[in-house]
Image (cartoon, rainbow, N blue to C red):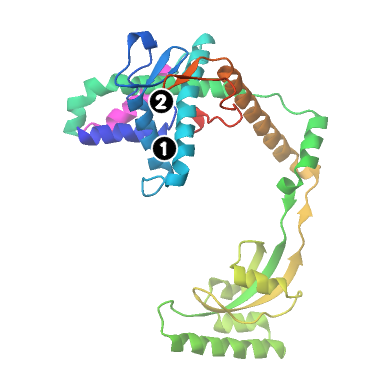
Amino acid sequence: MMRIHRALASLATAAALLAPACWAATGPAAHGAAGAVFAVVEGTAISTQEFEAALAGAIRQKFYHRRAPEEQLAALRQEVTDGLVNRVLLLNEARRRGIRPDEEKVRKEVMAYEQRYRDQPQWQEARVQLLPALTRALEEQSVITQLETATRVVPPPDEIGLGAYYESHPEQFTEPERVRLSMILLKVDPAAPAAAWEQALAQSQDVVKQLTAGADFAELAQLHSGDSSARDGGDLGYRHRGTLPAGVESGIDKLAPGAISEPFRLLEGIAVFRLVERKTAQLRSLKDVRRNVAELWSREQGETQWRKLLARLRSGADIRIGGELLHSGAVDGSTASSPAAH
């Protein structure tokens, strides 16, 4: 039984703040709730048990050791609270709009869950008790997902909007600086003794001398390099800024095209580089990135519409946390977390 309950906790974590599988109170506060009441949202009670389960799920999801640092706990509690409050408001809005669960999708998800645990005696013993809660969680997730999808739909941008977004986000459409490099790698086992590394360093310094004297880089790479690029004369192709180790990148920055680097110690051994070509960062034309601009614009506009919906639903809503009325401006809809997004 404990294993099944852990599995349901996993479902709650996956759905995050959307629909914990063991929601005990979704009806009016007047009908009562299981355990102490943590919050009441438009007459719907959220129990302390639900809050603690959602908080535990969020901690499992965000922190490797399943323990939130003390300095981050208050913010996480607020995030979980916002998510649970938003969930109730969004379910109410979905019902107001007549959105129904995708019954076929829910049925398939329940079947997949049963398929996963069908051979476990604990599941067979508990399934009658657990299936209603699981099904309800999936149905609620379905209607909120449909509401969010519909809210985020925006018409395509016009030419003015497209151009304005492109001009105001140049960093999104700039091809970063690239360098084309060749490398000779004198391989050394990371666990090798210091003497092996010293020998490789001495050999690399000799390689640098030969290259400086006019030796062909490709020939020396094919002769000495232990990297797979040796068959291509050491050619590594183009690399974007930030993809090289910090020490190597700073050294490459000092080179002019055609220059040979000093030896660098890498995890795999000692390397010598040749800078073949440098291409500076370049803003791509709107014509070339038009589709990407339109997609990013639509995503941003959809996010804005979703946050506006959350803010509108919270504005004026009767939200009481621990018995205290939460004023509509107490939680800004622009920062409130989206249950369906977690």
User: Which residue is tagged 1?
Assistant: 58
Taking 342 as reference, is 19 above or below it?
Answer: above
Residue 138, picture quadrant: top left
Magenta run includes residue 109: yes
- Discs 2/1, front: 1
Name the amino acid type tagged 2.
Answer: Ala
**23 vs 145, nearest the viewer:** 23
Horizontally, residue 55 falls left or right of residue 156, namely left
Taking 37 as reference, is 16 above or below it?
Answer: below
Magenta run includes residue 243: no
Residue 201, picture quadrant: bottom right
Q: Residue 80 carries which label?
A: none
How far apart are the alpha carbons under marks 2 and 1? Answer: 12 Å
Residue 252 place in picture, x, y as percent:
68, 72
User: Residue at left 44%, top 34%?
Assistant: 77
Taking 233 as reference, is 4 above or below it?
Answer: above
Q: Which residue range is magenta in the image?
A: 103-119
Residue 14 in sight here: yes
**271 vs 37, nearest the viewer:** 37
Residue 182 place in picture, x, y as percent:
65, 74
Horizontally, residue 198 falls left or right of residue 66, namely right
Q: Residue 19 carries which label?
A: 2
Residue 2, picture quadrant: top left
